[in-house]
Image (tube, coloured by chain):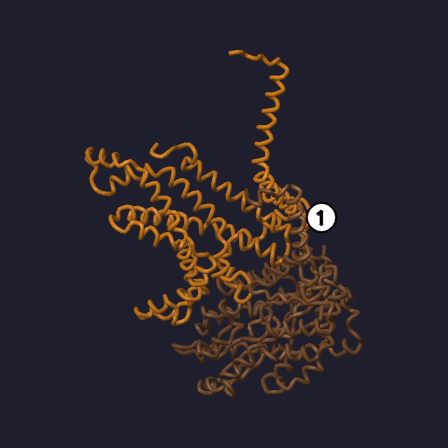
Chain colours: A brown, B orange
Amino acid sequence: MSSFQQLSRRELLKVFTFAGGAMLAGCSDKNPNGTKLTLTQWYHEYGEKGTFQAVQHYAREYSLLNPHIAVRVVWVPGDYGTKLATALLTPDGPDVFEDQLTEAMVSAGQVAPLDDLFTPEDLKDFNAKDIALNSVGGKIYGVKEIDDMQLLYFRKSVLKAAGVKPPTTMDELIAAAHALTTPTRKGIFLGNDGGVTALLTVLPWSAGSDFLVDNRIVFNNPRTVASYEKLLELNQSGSLLMGAPTDWWDPSSLTQGLAAMQWCGLWAYPKIHSILGDDLGAIIWPAFDNAGVPVTSLGGWTAMVNAQRPYVEEAKKFVKWLWIDNLKDQLDWCVGYGFHVPPRLSLAKRAPQLSAPIPAYAVKALGKYGQATPPLWNAAMTSDLTNSLTNIVKLGHNAARSVSNAATQCTRELNRELE
Amino acid sequence: MSVTHQNPETRVKERNKSHLRTTLSFWAFMAPALIGLILFMGVPIIWGFLLSLSHAQNTIHFGHFIGIRNYTDLLTDPEFLNSLYTIVIFTLFIVPITFVFSLWLALMVNKVGRGKAFFRTVFFIPTAVSYAAASLIWRMSLFNGTAFGFVNHLTALFGMSPIAWIGTASPPWYWLVLVTVRIWLQVGFYMIIFLAALQEIPHSLYEAAAMDGATGGWQVLRYITLPQLRATSVSILLLCLIAAFQAFDEFYNILGGSGASSGNIGLARPPLVYIYSIALSSQDFGMGAAGGFILTALIVMFTVVQGKLFGFGESREGK
């Protein structure tokens, strides 16, 4: 008879109780280093080399300063927004995460107010647009980690050889793209959907229109329609690169010579500059016409605290340490890998990496021309507007009618949101 | 031999005891599956239905009931109706093509004298590939829009310029990409089912047909093989139809359901991708649940109609 068979029922129960207890102990917030509490922090997967190691380093630094707290970094590849939103519906979501704030997150009680983390001096030093974008009902719910923006990059020598100047209006841009197109190279790359996603908000902004102002959908106007019709013209011109191996956020199409100009983020500047050197030129998106304005979108990522977790105060302290007080790590995060504009104005001025001609131009242009949609604008509205622009650009639908349909859909979404 | 007579009361008790034991055993064996079914199928279905009647933004809790508004909103949403139209068109293409192609492959493999196992395996292997992986290969390698994409490389041999297969709406080349990837992935599976059914057909039928003067492959196929495959064919049509209505992966991964270049998904967005974006990107779980029920109703409707047309469930092989 084996020893297992000799176990009495009572002994077996003891074994299971012990094993169960050991497993439960393993699941607690205590970690093997003897620290008492583990905060979970989520990031989307940044593409630049060294970014994951950097955020792990920041987390370790915090644990060294606060031995009773460990920070577990979760690096989320793929569709981050969906994964995060789903995790926030459960009690086991992250304690700290990065995302873009929406009013729906506030009304669902998912994010904790962070007003008490900012001193009046801090508030003055942060980009006022960032504070406004992360405020709902007079309360601040997020601390901006980085400001992202886009630029139209080009090779100066290629433009010069074709006798083309950097465009200052949409018509000039279409003409430039046409002039730069050769049998082996397209004039411009705006993403594999022909600029529908990348220029969805940029084009109407460049024509002086907007999307959601004072709780009203305001994009249903002839300027939006005209700007979208120009994207159709560009798509039909044969000068657009489509079907590239990577999308507009990656600069390979420009650096490998598949296109002469490319719309891409400031984040890619170090990589492009290392390949093209001083031949690299960049501008923000040109004004639609004389009545329009040049524009770039103010994007980026915001650190938020999950209000549904038990350690809100500890998580808030960590966010304050990393994204408000810790200027050294903020600078490292903004310019150590890809380039981003620091949301703290004093830091943006101090960063030596941002003093080269193109980054310096980018910082200035973002301050003056950067635009963003407010927290009330949501994913459903983006989806409605994207459908409308796809219908115009790809399927040849009437632009005025498509924009008007999108406005009806967005108003319905807005009313649902405001219920 | 002595016979002991139990009194009737004891006999009834024993019978009851044995009956109780049988009942208990039945439930003991059934309980795990039943509990699993109720917990993971029944509860979510009821929960989903209640959600579909609620305004559930950024929450999966029902309670804020709004009647059938989610259903009416969806059924008047042009993009949702468009997605239903897209999936019907896709189904009308993919089901007959898959059916004919897998039957043709099965007939060919069945005829092969030597190396049958080899060909069977070769054609079946794509079934083991994930839809996401195959979609990425189709998008980034085979149907890459630049001059060094595989298909563009081939077309260049005939002097054609590179084609942006995925982003071009007229002509709608993206359908070629979407349909070929699904055919490559699923045809082997249906071929195996056809092959099994082909091997079940008694050889004597073919001998009898030959004696009756059936000549040529077509006559034998028309009057012997196809009628013998009737039940299998109906099952394959149904499986294929349900799978087509549930299409998600290749549309999402080839046309891009989220992130950069999500504009292409507007060219052909199936209902599941639309429901996914409503529920998981926009976090409107009420409307997402309503979309799920509408799609289910549509699948049931098409299945019933197809079943009626082809007589599913009322025939056996050869009848």
Residue that appears at 58% across and 45% down: A4
Q: On screen, A285 above or below A134?
A: below
Chain of the residue under label 1? B
Viewer-side residue, A97 vs B283: A97
Viewer-side residue, A95 vs A195: A95
Q: Residues within 10 Å of mark 1 (few under 14, many from 20)?
A: few
Compared across the picture, whether A253 is left or right of B36 comes to: left
Q: On screen, A140 above or below B303?
A: below
* Farthest residue, direction front: A1
Compared across the picture, whether A318 is left or right of A270 comes to: right
Please state, as top left, top right, bottom left or bottom right, where the C terminus of chain B lies in the image: top left
Compared across the picture, whether A212 is left or right of B273 comes to: right
The answer to whether residue B154 is seen in the rendering is yes
The answer to whether residue A360 is seen in the rendering is no
Residue that appears at 42% across and 37% down: B309
Picture quadrant of residue A61 = bottom right
Picture quadrant of residue B126 = bottom left
Amino acid, disc 1: His
Residue marked by disc 1: B64
